[in-house]
Amino acid sequence: MQRVRVSRVAALSALILLGCKEKPNADEKADQPSPNASILPAPIASGALATKKIDAGRGGIPADSLGRLIIPEAAPPTPTVMADNRALDPDPTTQREGPGVTLEAQFRWHDVPSPLAGPELNEAGIEKARELTELRVTIDLAPIGRMRFAFASPTFPVPQNAELRAAELLYGHVLVWPDGHAYRVLVPGTVRALLGERRADASPMAAGNLRAMGKGGLLGLDTKKTRVKSDTGTLTLEQANVAGIGNSGGLLCRLLLELVAVEPMNSVCEQDTPLKAESKTVDGGRVTFEVTSLVRRHDMPYGLLLVPPAGTLVKPGELPPQAAGVLLTREQLAAFRTKPAKRAETTENAPAEGLIAVNQSDTLRYLLIDGVPVAWVRPRSEQFLIGTQPGRYNISWRDFYGTTTEAVQAVSLPARVTVGAKPDAGK
């Protein structure tokens, strides 16, 4: 009986040993795949894959591989191009007062002839006329992203007190009538023709190549110089960081780029304000823009900078009406000489007094007497000026940009003076 019990216990022990497996060591266990691997996330890869954004689908917010939302920084709105065949939407800016800067500036011509010397020459009268005909402008810049560029001289081929206005989020300008009751849109590329020909034709525009030209200083401010080159010419800008006006200095930069037909979306106009700009055309013309004073203001009326002006009519295809381009009065012309010459010569077809300026060319031209612009004359037309005393004067012609200049001539007035060739009428 005892032997049977021992046998049964041994047999039971053997069966238990046969049903058990050998326990693995620690290294072997680490190499085995987890039975839960199919329901856990895959290992995170290194490098680019670790930072790869996951598409959240349309309307979703992107996230990285850890599920963290990725919210991009808000980009500034992209400006839109004005349309010249319809009215602009009202300006949302409120008509309040605020900070800003007012610049006084002028365009300067180069290689202007000197007066003709003589016993009757009145230098004081000529200097006074020169001051009256300076190509002066007044520019208001405000941190709300607005610019007003007012023509403060009668010498431009647009009326005195007419304005160009610009907004940061609009490419182009609005030309405002001197009385402020009407405007028209000027698409990008139009300013060049407006100043040079009194036309609203848009020139083809190029991107422009930039080149740093060193540093300088103007009006007590540090400046940096940049040359912008296009197929039309080069514009050398001298710009400064004018505090307190936001990005509105770029609006003046955009306007000046149009002198050489460069697109307004240029990095040179992103921050600083131009204080000087020299334009050189491929035809040899040269004109300089320069700021002569800078005044900071705390009471600038933003209502005068709206684009478009509030409550005004839009006049597509029109320009502000302007009288004939006579720049000086009879008395101011007479002041070029202290008295008439004793022996005044006469020429064929001369008027009884003064002079007749005849422009037979196909572009607008300025007539200069003793180096002073006294009139601009439309293409294929003539202008009668009264006031010059009998005597000899230096007479010359030019266009606004100096691309076409005529050699100075000493002419006895009264006379009929002509520029350009008479068009061939054919056989």
Image (cartoon, rainbow, N blue to C red):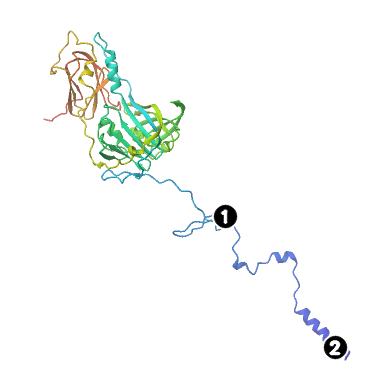
Q: Which residue is mark 1?
A: 50
347 versus 33 height, above or below: above
- Amino acid type of the residue that numbered disc 1 sits on in the rendered structure: Ala
Residue 119: image x %, image y %?
25, 8
**Residue ID at (74%, 65%):** 26
| Residue ID for mark 2 | 5
Secondary element type, mark 1: helix
Q: Position of residue 141 (x, y in %)?
A: 38, 35
Please provide percent x and percent y for residue 87. Answer: 27, 45
Q: Is residue 262 visible?
A: no
Q: Nearer the viewer, residue 141 or 258?
A: 141
Left or right, 23 with reference to 211: right
Residue 124 is drawn in which quadrant? top left
State whether residue 60 is above or below residue 358.
below
Q: Nearer the viewer, residue 324 or 295?
A: 295
Q: Residue furthest toward the bottom?
A: 1
Q: Secondary structure at mark 2?
A: helix
Q: Are marks 2 and 1 in contact (CB under 8 Å)?
A: no
Residue at image location 70% in from the left, 64% down from the top:
30
The quarter of the image holding the C terminus is top left
x and y, in percent, of residue 20 in the image: 75, 77
Residue placed most toward the observer, 334 or 32: 334
How far apart marks 2 and 1 lie (CA) works out to: 68 Å
Of labels 2 and 1, earlier in sequence is: 2
